[in-house]
Image (cartoon, rainbow, N blue to C red):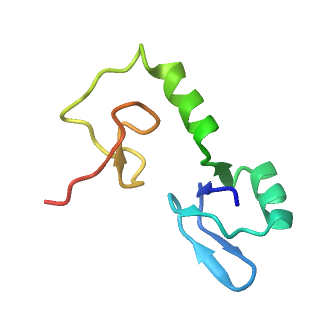
Amino acid sequence: MPTYRVLTGIDYPPDKRAEEGALVTDIPEKSAKWLLDQGLIESADGKSKTAKVEEVKDKVVFDPNATDGDGDGFLQDGTPFQRPVEEK
């Protein structure tokens, strides 16, 4: 079953909810199509993530002082240096 990253909180059948940043594998195919079309989810399968990283690989450097600008719980999103925010 495909894996999707939730880009904004969504409700989906049957009576489920996923918040922004969640990875889900149980979205019904019929729902996934229109959620993708509306930009509410994106594919999180290996191919799309790898392509995104390869595009920026040579342009991004590790930033030890990176901040979570979009509040999704990750630093340096979409780069080879993406990592979860460490709780203090």
Q: Residue furthest bottom?
A: 15
Q: Residue at x 53, y 61 (%)?
A: 20
Instruction: Judge from the rendering whether residue 47 lies leftward or rightward of residue 34; answer left or right.
Output: left
Q: Quadrant of the C terminus?
A: bottom left
Front one among 69 and 32: 32
Residue 11, image x, y percentages: 68, 75
Instruction: Judge from the rendering whether residue 1 lies leftward or rightward of residue 33; answer left or right.
Output: left
Q: Residue furthest top?
A: 58
Q: Residue at x 39, y 30 (%)?
A: 80
Q: Residue at x 36, y 48 (%)?
A: 74
Q: Residue at x 82, y 63 (%)?
A: 29
Q: Residue furthest front?
A: 1
Front one among 75 and 3: 3
From the viewer's perspective, is residue 5 above or below residue 30?
above
From the viewer's perspective, is residue 71 above or below residue 64?
below
Q: Residue furthest right?
A: 30
Count of picture labels = 0
Quadrant in which residue 18 is drawn: bottom right
Instruction: Judge from the rendering whether residue 88 lies leftward or rightward of residue 45; answer left or right.
Output: left
Residue 34, image x, y percentages: 83, 58
Q: Quadrant of the N terminus?
A: bottom right
From the viewer's perspective, is residue 48 above or below residue 31?
above
Quadrant in which residue 64 is drawn: top left
From the viewer's perspective, is residue 18 above or below residue 39?
below
Instruction: Judge from the rendering whether residue 64 lies leftward or rightward of residue 48; answer left or right.
Output: left
